[in-house]
Every structure is written in structure tokens, then in C-alpha cells.
Amino acid sequence: AQKVTQAQTEISVVEKEDVTLDCVYETRDTTYYLFWYKQPPSGELVFLIRRNSFDEQNEISGRYSWNFQKSTSSFNFTITASQVVDSAVYFCALSDVSGNTPLVFGKGTRLSVIA
Amino acid sequence: GAGVSQSPSNKVTEKGKDVELRCDPISGHTALYWYRQSLGQGLEFLIYFQGNSAPDKSGLPSDRFSAERTGGSVSTLTIQRTQQEDSAVYLCASSLIPAASSGNTIYFGEGSWLTVV
């Protein structure tokens, strides 16, 4: 069975600090996809990134970066120089590659960035 | 529309009443998902549609919950005889059914906030 664990329930940081959100997953599939979503107070889930299990290269997009480590089944998300607008709940998710099953989500990490 | 649209955005209902939640997916998306998010909880999968059929209903919590999709587009989630524990945000999402190599990016609506009093 697939499972996603986000051990950090809530994190508070001061603006401009760097923060890393942890995500550990379990799957028996050899190929799969990993995702991160942001849920701001408005409630909508905003897609941030999709990573194919074949590709272990780290990815950077502006202040966001992702560290995928297949050996430890982790897909951690780092925000550099955090801003108040980064305050949200962040979800890590896992899916198989068939497109025929739903995403399995972690419980989310609530990030509060304090000015 | 450009995104997944859900209505109503907020609904307060009395215990025992039926409610209908509507989802209008992104045009051309054949897959549609319903999730539930209770206060302080993660996202709980409810049901998935591929076209008008629902290959996976495993997440529906009880027989009071049902969903349908018509014309491969709009979906309605119906909760009969609502209970207080049904209070949650009900999120709808849609995606294309791509080839396996292109992944399964899912786009979410803003959710319907349901409060059962």
C-alpha cells in the first residue's frame, strides 16, 4: 500500500529564515510520481511540483527547492528566505504512473512565517 | 472556465438534511476526484471518475454518500441524512489521463465548506 508521512504538523519561522518540510513515502511500485501542493488560507490546493521516480536530480525554482532521495524514500521541500506569503499548509503526495489511481496525500505541514 | 469550479463555496445544513455539492472540472479533463479534508486532517480520498464511470469508490465513508458524473463533465457529490461528522471541506480535482510517461498532475478547486449543525 502507498503511504505518505509528513511528520511535521506545524512549523513557525521568522521571515527570511530557510525552512525544510519533510516528506517520507512508502510504495511497492518501482516507478511512481511525487508531488507537493500548497494550500493557502483560501483553501485551494496549488500544484507546486511533480517528480518522476526515475529522476533523482534536485530541482530549484526560485526560492523553492526539492531534494529527492530514493534511497531514503524522501522528497523534502526547502523554502529559502521565507516570506509571510509562504504561510500555508503544504501537502506531499504520491501516485502510481498509470493515472488510474488517486493521489495519496500526507496529512500536511502547516507553515507559519512571522514578520 | 480556466480552473476547477465548485459550488456552493459554503453550506450550512441541519443534521438529517441532504446536501448536494457540485464540481465543474477543467474543460477536457476526463478524470475527476473528490477528496474530503476535515479540520486539522489530511486529504481523504472519496471517489474517482474516469469519464462517467467510477472505477474506485473505495473511499466513500458510508452508503449515505454517493456521487455521479454526467456527460463526462460536471459531477455531483450527494450526502444524505447529514451528520455532524460530515462537516469538512469537500475538494474536487480534475486531471487529464495522460500517457504514463507524462504523469498525473491534478488540479484542485477551492472546495465546498460544509457545516452540519
Image (spheres, helix red, strand yellow):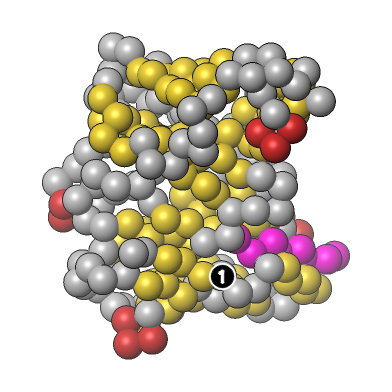
Quarter of the N terminus of chain A within the rendering: bottom left
Q: Residue at x 51, y 54 (%)?
A: A37
| Span shown in magenta | A108-115
Report the magenta stretch's main SS: strand
Query: The residue tagged with tag 1: helix, strand or loop?
Result: loop
Q: Position of residue A5 (x, y in %)?
A: 51, 70
**For residue A31, which quarter of the picture?**
bottom left
Q: Is residue A109 magenta?
A: yes
In the shown orientation, is residue A56 left or right of residue B37? left
- Per the image, the residue denoted by label 1 is A6
Quick one: label 1, few (<14), some, or many (20+) residues within 10 Å? many
Q: Position of residue B60 (x, y in %)?
A: 46, 36
Indicate the chain on which mark 1 is placed: A
Residue A96 in sight here:
yes
Nearer to us in this view, A101 or B2: A101
Q: Position of residue B49 (x, y in %)?
A: 32, 30
Q: Residue at x 54, y 25 (%)?
A: B64
In the shown orientation, is residue B112 left or right of residue B76? right
